[in-house]
């Protein structure tokens, strides 16, 4: 069976194994819960879940929001006008979270769709170039390789040094023919957190557009798009904002909206009907909302945003980054090669393993441990979330001893 570049497997125990943790794990269950959220996450009593960078477990209020929407559709469907109003409320919620305005936020369906909108708006021609780094997500390698073939533009890829890509690595690749500098704000590969302000300044100094794939960032730590200087960013909502699938908030800086074009049209594009065949199309980010969205996931997103806002994203960052730091130190003490730079302020830690992939999978399943095994079974990525505890990290370090 072919193995993808992204993930060999996710060690999630079979559904039959989703019972309460063994009695030997009582200490993990009874450990302090600094954010007071553990009781809202059913997964916390089922498995050792340290895999939020893959799919973040959903808390009870988000589950209830999804159930209520589904029940309503079955018994008394919510009218379209109310769903559209709720969509705009969630749009405003998200805008507040990232320090944007509601008219700078659209709802797409996936993170990759956001970058495709940007890419097709660049007007790439032979002699132009796009700069990314090797810590980016797979979509960018496919997208810009195919665009290079079609347009003659060049794809330039900055190499990581010590698991990090800084302006020092990007700068030699950026010139007056650079149309775009694109990075993942936090890399899904090893959790490296980019300095977005420095990257935006580099791009803008050469007249280039700056894009961030922020699916591994928003909800993990406070985001301020104004301070960061990004021109556009997009996220999926099934990771750190605790939502579902099928909706992807797409931020575009107001001044950049005219530069991004639409390639499809639908009923939601219409700001005002001027005649039977004459329409005024939205000039805000709503110009990307062209058809009926995934209303159910939007309702769940609203609940997820409520949840992380109530807890405090700054508190989530402090807690989970401390867990990641504890994990890094423990893994190094055990002799593992940690692929995440020391002092990195994200909740993702990756390390190298040499044990056979089938043995790793069996050990993780036997210990009811959910993490991601990646890069043809040579790496493990661990990503604690807001409900995890010091005891969870210590328990994983015990599990890790069996991975050597």
Image (cartoon, rainbow, N blue to C red):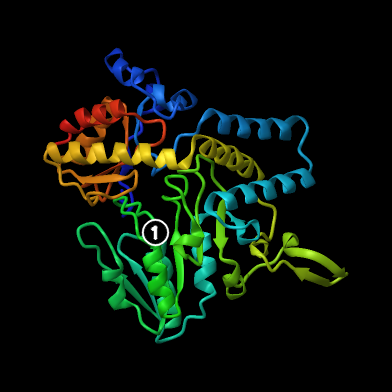
Quarter of the image where one finds residue 161: bottom left
Question: Quick one: 223 or 24, which is closer to the camera?
Answer: 223
Q: As displayed, is residue 245 above or below residue 105?
A: above
Q: As displayed, is residue 389 above or below residue 248?
A: above
**Which residue ends up furthest to the left in the rendered image?**
335
Measuring 46% from the left and 84% from the top, which residue is drawn there?
Answer: 125
Quarter of the image where one finds residue 288: bottom right
Measuring 38% from the left and 73% from the top, which residue is drawn there?
Answer: 202
**Which residue ends up furthest to the bottom in the rendered image?**
127
Helix or strand or loop: what does disc 1 sit on?
A: strand
Measuring 64% from the left and 40% from the top, which residue is drawn there?
Answer: 299
Question: Quick one: 91 or 260, which is closer to the camera?
Answer: 91
Q: Which residue is mark 1?
A: 184
Q: Looking at the figure, which quarter contains the C terminus?
A: top left
Left/right of residue 275 with respect to residue 228 in the rendered view: right
Left/right of residue 302 with respect to residue 177 in the rendered view: right
Q: As displayed, is residue 42 above or below residue 250?
A: above
Q: As displayed, is residue 28 above or below residue 255?
A: above
Question: Quick one: 346 or 133, which is closer to the camera?
Answer: 346
**Can residue 247 be seen at all in this image of the molecule?**
no
Residue 98 spot, x, y in % from top left: 53, 53
Residue 374 spot, x, y in % from top left: 28, 47
Measuring 34% from the left and 78% from the top, which residue is drawn there?
Answer: 174
């Amino acid at each position: 069976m072919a193995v993808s570049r992204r993930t060999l497997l996710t060690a999630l125990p079979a559904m039959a194994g989703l019972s309460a943790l063994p009695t030997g794990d009582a200490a993990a269950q009874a450990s302090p819960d600094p954010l007071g959220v553990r009781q809202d996450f059913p997964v916390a009593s089922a498995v050792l879940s340290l895999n939020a960078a893959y799919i973040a477990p959903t808390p009870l209020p988000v589950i209830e929001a999804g159930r209520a929407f589904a029940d309503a559709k079955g018994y008394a469907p919510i009218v379209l006008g109310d769903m559209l109003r709720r969509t705009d409320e969630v749009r405003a919620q998200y805008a507040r979270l990232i320090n944007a305005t509601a008219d700078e936020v659209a709802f797409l369906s996936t993170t990759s769709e956001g970058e495709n909108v940007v890419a097709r708006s660049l007007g790439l021609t032979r002699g132009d170039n796009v700069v990314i780094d090797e810590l980016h997500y797979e979509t960018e390698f496919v997208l810009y390789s195919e665009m290079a073939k079609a347009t003659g533009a060049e794809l330039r890829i900055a190499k990581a040094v010590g698991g990090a890509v800084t302006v020092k690595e990007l700068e030699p690749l950026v010139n007056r023919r650079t149309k775009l500098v694109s990075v993942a704000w936090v890399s899904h590969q090893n959790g490296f957190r980019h300095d977005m302000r420095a990257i935006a300044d580099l791009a803008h100094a050469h007249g280039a557009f700056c894009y961030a794939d922020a699916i591994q960032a928003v909800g993990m730590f406070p985001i301020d798009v104004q301070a960061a200087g990004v021109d556009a960013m997009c996220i999926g909502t099934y990771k750190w904002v605790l939502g579902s699938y099928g909706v992807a908030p797409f931020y575009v800086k107001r001044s950049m909206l005219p530069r991004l074009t639409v390639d499809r049209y639908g009923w939601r594009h219409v700001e005002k009907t001027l005649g039977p065949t004459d329409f005024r199309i939205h000039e805000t980010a709503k110009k990307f909302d062209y058809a009926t969205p995934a209303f159910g996931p939007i309702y769940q997103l609203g609940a997820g945003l409520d949840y992380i806002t109530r807890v405090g994203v700054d508190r989530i960052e402090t807690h989970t980054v401390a867990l990641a730091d504890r994990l890094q130190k423990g893994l190094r003490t055990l002799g593992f090669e940690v692929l995440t730079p020391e002092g990195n302020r994200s909740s993702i830690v990756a390390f190298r393993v040499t044990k056979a992939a089938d043995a790793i999978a069996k050990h993780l399943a036997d210990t009811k441990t959910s993490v991601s095994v990646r890069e043809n079974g040579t790496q493990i990525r661990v990503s604690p979330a807001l409900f995890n505890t010091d005891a969870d990290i210590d328990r994983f370090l015990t599990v890790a001893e069996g991975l050597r």
